[in-house]
Amino acid sequence: MPRTAEDVENYLLQLDRRFENDGGTYLISAESRDQPPIALRVAPPIVAIRVAITEVPPEAEHQTALFRRLLEYNATDLMHISYGIDNGTVVLSAALELENLDLNELEAALSDVDLALARHVPVLRGIART
């Protein structure tokens, strides 16, 4: 049976995630106040997860260090989500297929986000500000 936004909302409740529904986009509270919120949008046929991390620094030397670290994290630490650049902002994102989405798949993607926010973001922001 195909999944709906209501199914996704029920999964978030089962995972004990605090969230607000802002016009179809779920803003999921991060574990810590200094971490950005997680945006989850149900846009059939996908569920998009996205977190804005930091701005890309203007200096080429810092960009190179930042981009290298992003690629290393994508290759070694993350399985269900990845870093990218969108309009000068480092983002963490994933696209999950709504039709077959289950609780375990959503939990795995959100666990990747939690890991990244806790372990990677301080390092990435440090590189971007150096």
Image (cartoon, grey):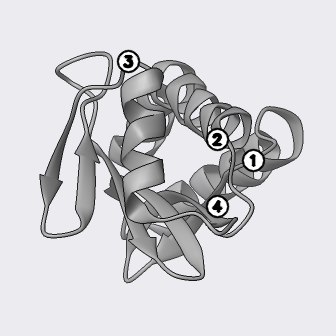
Disc marking residue 16: 3
Query: Relative to the observer, which residue lies in front, 80 or 9?
Result: 9
Quadrant the N terminus occupies: bottom right
Instruction: Please report whichever mark, 4 or 1, sits nearer to the chain's N-terminal start.
Output: 4
Residue 54 in sight from this viewpoint? yes
Residue 56 in sight from this viewpoint? no
Q: Is residue 8 left or right of residue 29?
A: right
> Cα distance, mark 2 to mark 1?
5 Å
Labels 2 & 1 near each other (Cβ < 8 A): yes
> Cα distance, mark 4 to mark 1?
24 Å
Instruction: Please report whichever mark, 2 or 4, sits nearer to the chain's N-terminal start.
Output: 4
Nearer to us: label 4 or label 1? 1
> Cα distance, mark 4 to mark 3?
38 Å
> Cα distance, mark 2 to mark 4?
27 Å
Disc marking residue 80: 1
Image location (x, y in percent) of residue 82? 67, 55
Q: Mark 2 points at which residue?
A: 109
The residue that appears at 72% across and 42% down in the rendered structure is 105
Nearer to us: label 2 or label 4? 2
The residue that appears at 59% across and 23% down in the rendered structure is 115
- Callout 1, which amino acid? His
- Callout 3, which amino acid? Asp
Asked which secondary structure carries label 2, the reply is helix
Asked which secondary structure carries label 4, the reply is helix
Labels 4 & 3 near each other (Cβ < 8 A): no
